[in-house]
Image (cartoon, rainbow, N blue to C red):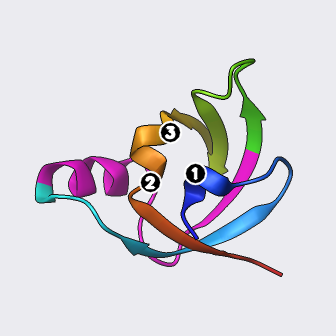
Amino acid sequence: MTLRAARLDRTYCITAVQAPDAPRRHLAALGFEEGALVTCLLAAPRGDPVAFGVRGAVIALRKSQLQALTVQEAG
């Protein structure tokens, strides 16, 4: 599944990042890389963007960016 389908208050492990080189580097700089644990914290009223806790920070991404992140639920 992709991170776009994430549910609030659930933690996921990123298993793959399927994006072109520049967007993949940008996501990695924000902490969204293979092996990272991310927690879905908050979604905007219309569902876009979505805020995640990742490596001690809170980062909001658009759903179009989330489509590039393959995850599995942790725990």
Question: What residue range appears in magenta?
Answer: 22-40
User: On screen, 40 above or below 16?
Assistant: above
Amino acid type indicated by mark 3: Lys
Locate residue 72, reporting x and y percent: 65, 77
Amino acid type indicated by mark 1: Arg
* Residue in the image at 25% along x and 60% along y: 19
Q: Quadrant of residue 64?
A: top left
* Residue in the image at 65% along x and 44% along y: 52
Residue 55 appearing in the image = no
Q: Residue under circle 1? A: 4
Locate residue 38, reporting x and y percent: 65, 59
**In the orientation shown, which residue stands out farthest toward the top?**
45
Cα–Cα gap, marks 2 and 3: 6 Å
Q: Residue under circle 2? A: 67
Q: Is residue 3 left or right of residue 22?
A: right
Q: Residue under circle 3? A: 63
**In the orientation shown, which residue stands out farthest toward the left?**
21
